[in-house]
C-alpha cells in the first residue's frame, strides 16, 4: 500500500466457510455499503461486480487473514487485478473493540477489517507466488503426515508394551526399515486382537514414512532449483528453506528487511516509561511458523563455527542470557534470509524473462506465413 492518501474506498471482508460478508468504508471509516455472498466462484463474481458498480475501480480489499477460509477469494481478486491487503485477526479484533458499535456480527467484523486497513497503511499486500504456494502445500502435507505417524508410533509402542515390554523398539527406530521388519516378524507370531492392531499400525507407519520420504525428496529438488541462495546460509537445509519460502509468500511484498522481521515476529518490542528504559522484550506476534524456522537456523549457527557462533558468544560475554543472545542472533539471521530471498526472486524473474525471449526466438514468422498459405492452398485443392 502506498499510503492512506491513495485510498478512496476499502472493502472489508469477514470470511467464513460458507459465506463472505463485505462492507465498504470511505476514507473516514464510515460504512457505505454491505453485501453477503456465498463462498463460491459465483459469489466471487457477485462480490467483484458489486464493488465495481458501487465504488468504481479505485478501491482496496481488506481480507481477514484466515488462509484456509480466505485463500480462494484472495486468488480470485488477484486474478481480477484487484489490490488485496491481509489483516491479522488480532488487529481486526482490537479495531472492533475500540469502535463505538457494540456487539459482534459479520458486518461489524467486516467494517473492523476495513477500518484496520485505513489505520495501518503498512499491512502486508497479498500477491501471487506459485513457487511459495507449491512449497507451502508440500511442507504442510509433510508436517501433517509426521504428526499422523507420530500418533501411530505412540499407539504401537503402548500395544507392544502390553504384549511384551522386552520387544519394545526405540521410538526413533520405527522410521527405519529394519527395525520395523524385525518388529513385524515378532508380531506375526503373537496371537490376539492387540497383536492384530499393532500389525496394522506398523503397516500404517511404514506407509506414512514412504510418503514423507517422497515428499522430502520432492521438496529438496524444488528448493535446490528455486532457492539456491537460501541454502548457502549455515543452518538452512532444504526443509527449512522450503518453510521460509512458503511462509514468506513472496518477498517482494515487504518494503524492507525490518518489515520482514516484524512479520516474522523477530523485531524486539520497545519498553520505556517516564524516562526509564527497560530491556527490549520478545514478541509473540507475527508468523510463528516462519519464526520457528528462523529460530532453527539461529540455534544451528550457535553450534557450528562461523560468524553466527562468534556473535552469539560475544553477546553472552556482554551479559546477555542464552535466550536474549539467541534473539539477537535470530534478528541478524533475518537480514541474511531477506537478502537471499530477494536474490532468489530476482534469479527466478531473470530466468523467466530468458525463457520468454528464447521462446520468442524460436518463432519464425516467415515460415509460419508460408505454412499458412500452403495449408489454405491444400484446402482449396481438396475442395
Image (cartoon, grey):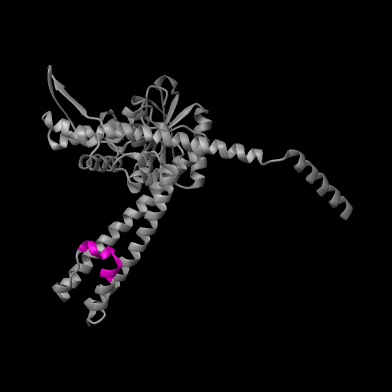
Q: Quadrant of residue 215?
A: bottom left
In percent of width and height, residue 179 lies at 25, 69
Region in magenta: 171-180
Q: Is residue 263 left or right of residue 219?
A: left
- The residue at 55%/36% (across/down) is 353
Image position of 262 with respect to 192: above or below: above
Query: Is residue 201 at all visible to an observer of this figure?
Result: no
In percent of width and height, residue 145 lies at 33, 58
Q: Nearer the viewer, residue 205 or 349?
A: 349
- The residue at 52%/41% (across/down) is 45
Q: Quadrant of residue 116?
A: top left
Image position of 242 with respect to 218: above or below: above
Task: Spot the residue most to the top.
Answer: 275
- The residue at 42%/34% (across/down) is 343
Q: Nearer the viewer, residue 297 or 288?
A: 297
Image position of 259 with respect to 323: above or below: above
Q: Quadrant of residue 30?
A: top left
Q: Is residue 7 magenta?
A: no
Query: Is residue 316 at all visible to an observer of this figure?
Result: yes
Q: Is residue 221 left or right of residue 244?
A: right
**Quadrant placement of the C terminus:** bottom right
Count every numbered label the image shows and give the total: 0
Q: Nearer the viewer, residue 300 or 328?
A: 300
**Quadrant placement of the N terminus:** top left
In percent of width and height, residue 244 lies at 34, 41
In percent of width and height, residue 195 lies at 23, 77
- The residue at 50%/30% (across/down) is 54
Which secondary structure type mostly characterizes the magenta part of the structure?
A: helix
Task: Spot the residue most to the front.
Answer: 305
Amino acid at each position: 500500500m502506498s499510503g492512506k492518501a491513495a485510498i478512496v474506498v476499502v472493502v472489508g471482508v469477514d470470511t467464513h466457510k460458507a459465506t463472505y460478508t463485505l462492507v465498504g468504508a470511505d476514507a473516514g471509516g464510515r460504512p457505505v455499503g454491505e453485501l453477503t455472498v456465498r463462498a463460491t466462484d459465483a459469489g466471487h463474481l457477485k462480490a467483484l461486480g458489486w464493488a465495481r458498480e458501487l465504488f468504481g475501480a479505485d478501491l482496496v480489499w481488506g481480507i481477514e487473514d484466515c488462509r484456509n477460509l480466505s485463500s480462494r477469494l484472495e486468488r480470485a481478486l488477484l486474478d481480477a487485478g484487484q489490490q488485496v491487503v491481509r489483516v491479522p485477526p488480532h488487529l481486526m479484533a482490537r479495531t472492533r473493540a475500540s469502535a463505538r458499535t457494540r456487539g459482534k456480527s459479520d458486518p461489524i467484523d467486516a467494517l473492523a477489517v476495513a477500518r484496520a486497513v485505513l489505520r495501518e497503511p503498512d499491512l502486508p499486500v497479498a500477491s501471487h507466488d506459485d513457487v511459495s504456494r507449491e512449497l507451502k502445500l508440500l511442507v504442510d502435507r509433510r508436517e501433517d503426515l509426521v504428526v499422523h505417524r507420530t500418533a501411530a508410533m505412540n499407539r504401537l509402542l503402548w500395544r507392544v508394551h502390553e504384549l511384551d515390554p522386552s520387544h519394545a523398539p526405540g521410538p526413533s527406530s520405527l522410521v527405519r526399515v529394519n527395525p520395523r521388519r524385525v518388529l513385524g516378524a515378532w508380531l506375526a507370531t503373537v496371537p490376539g486382537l492387540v497383536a492384530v492392531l499393532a500389525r496394522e499400525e506398523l503397516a500404517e507407519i511404514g506407509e506414512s514414512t514412504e510418503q514423507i520420504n517422497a515428499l522430502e525428496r520432492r521438496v529438496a529438488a524444488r528448493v535446490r532449483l528455486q532457492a539456491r541462495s537460501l541454502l548457502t546460509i549455515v543452518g538452512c537445509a532444504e526443509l527449512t528453506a522450503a518453510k521460509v519460502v512458503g511462509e514468506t509468500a513472496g518477498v517482494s511484498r515487504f518494503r524492507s528487511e525490518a518489515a520482514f522481521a516484524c512479520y516474522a515476529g523477530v523485531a524486539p518490542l520497545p519498553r520505556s516509561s517516564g524516562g526509564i528504559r527497560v530491556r527490549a522484550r520478545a514478541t509473540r506476534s507475527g508468523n510463528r511458523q516462519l519464526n520457528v524456522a528462523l529460530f532453527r537456523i539461529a540455534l544451528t549457527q550457535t553450534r557450528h563455527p562461523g560468524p553466527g557462533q562468534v556473535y552469539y558468544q560475544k553477546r553472552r560475554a556482554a551479559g546477555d542470557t542464552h535466550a536474549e543472545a539467541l534473539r539477537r542472533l535470530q534478528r541478524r539471521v533475518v537480514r541474511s534470509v531477506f537478502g537471499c530471498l530477494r536474490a532468489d526472486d530476482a534469479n527466478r524473474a531473470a530466468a523467466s524473462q530468458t525463457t520468454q525471449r528464447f521462446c520468442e526466438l524460436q518463432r519464425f514468422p516467415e515460415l509460419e506465413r508460408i505454412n499458412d498459405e500452403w495449408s489454405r492452398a491444400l484446402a482449396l485443392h481438396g475442395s
